[in-house]
Amino acid sequence: MTAETAPGRIVLIGSGEIGPSMAPLHRSLVASLPKRSTPSSLVALDGSYDFQTNRAEMGEKIAVFFRSKVGIPTTVIGLPETDRAGADLAPSALAPTIAGLNAADLIFLGPGSPSRALRRWGGTPIIEQLIARIQNGATLIASSAAAAASGRCTIPVYEIYKAGTNPVWLDGLDIIGALTGLAVAVVPHWNNNEGATHDTSRCFIGEGRLQQLERVLPDGAAILGIDEHSALTIDLGANSVTVGGKGAVTIRIPGIGETAMHSGATESLSTFVARFGAAAGAPRATIATTEAPLSVPATGAGVDVSVAVEQMIALRAAARAERRFSDADALRAAIEALGVELVDEPTGARWSLRA
């Protein structure tokens, strides 16, 4: 990154990436790109859906949307030999993809299968190049399957929901971790309700299966849920985080609870990162939502709860600032359940352990 170039953005979309509800977001991303002597352009990678027989049709649909509805020149590129993992390909096979990434101001990774995205992009220079491009001012839009693949851990949705595989995590691409330091599992389609008679929320696997997966999350990791037709924009250059679209973004820390940022919410990146701090010391347990008292770590002689308390106080302060008072009350109840006396003062919350 040069001194003249500010870092770019990563945009996580829960669904509807090339639908009418997301078009205004894409147009605003294009409009806010740094001005350059050459026109802006977008490159879309097809690796997440290149196993589908309608691969070409999908690519054309994406290109037409961005060209006609967003107003930006768009090229769709992929990798050859679709029956092989990307890491198995010779470096020369990756050259056109790398060249495309270097030439684009916006990079789009979209629908398909999360595990397919990992197979095609994981272990290749593509991921390093994506990170480098963002660090040098580009915007990465990762939606649906690609959003799921972008975290530390990834849900193999097709294998669990369609083929009946027992819930298991795959190692993700960890683009978010490289850029922000956050260890998250991104769960798009968070609020999906297509099942009608069965639970298809949490990216179609349902709440029960997600709770099974949460118990085996790596230490320090948390869940980042993205509602359908909703987006989380992490702007590294502006040090800001914004939620857009129709729904919300849910931050869920195993053993602690969850909180939501609704459409229109914005905060500094440092405040957003602080929301995840309690994940480092949280036990793996069934999650309680902030609509009820939260599960909390065990206390007792020799147990240091100071890190968890400080992070929960930070979460509560953010909830109060956003007028999410039910969330703030639930967090206070969780803090007090640790045996903590919490006192609100003009300068902030003060706490001490009850005798």
Image (spheres, helix red, strand yellow):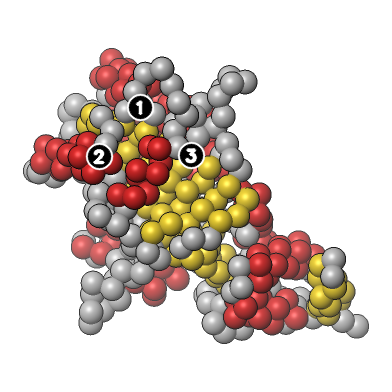
Q: Residue 66: which numbered mark, if any?
A: 2
Residue that extends furthest to the right in the rendered view of this protein: 355
Mark 3 nearby-residue class (10 Å; few <14, some 14–19, many ≥20): many
Q: Gap between marks 3 and 2, in whole Å?
A: 18 Å
Mark 2 nearby-residue class (10 Å; few <14, some 14–19, many ≥20): many
> Closer to the camera, 176 or 13?
13
Q: Earlier in the sequence, mark 3 or mark 1?
A: 3
Q: Is residue 220 above or below residue 205?
A: above
Secondary element at image label 3: strand
* 279 on left or right of 12: right
Q: Earlier in the sequence, mark 3 or mark 2?
A: 3
Residue 43 coordinates in the image, percent (x, y): 29, 31
Residue 130 coordinates in the image, percent (x, y): 42, 31
Q: Gap between marks 3 and 1, in whole Å?
A: 15 Å
> Closer to the camera, 288 or 179?
179
Question: Which quarter of the figure has residue 323?
Answer: bottom right
- The amino acid beneath tag 3 is Arg
Q: Gap between marks 1 and 2, in whole Å?
A: 12 Å
* Residue at the spot 59% in from the left edge and 40% down from the top edge: 238
Residue 222 coordinates in the image, percent (x, y): 54, 59
- The amino acid beneath tag 2 is Phe
Question: Which quarter of the figure has residue 160?
Answer: bottom left
Q: Nearer the viewer, mark 3 or mark 2?
A: 2
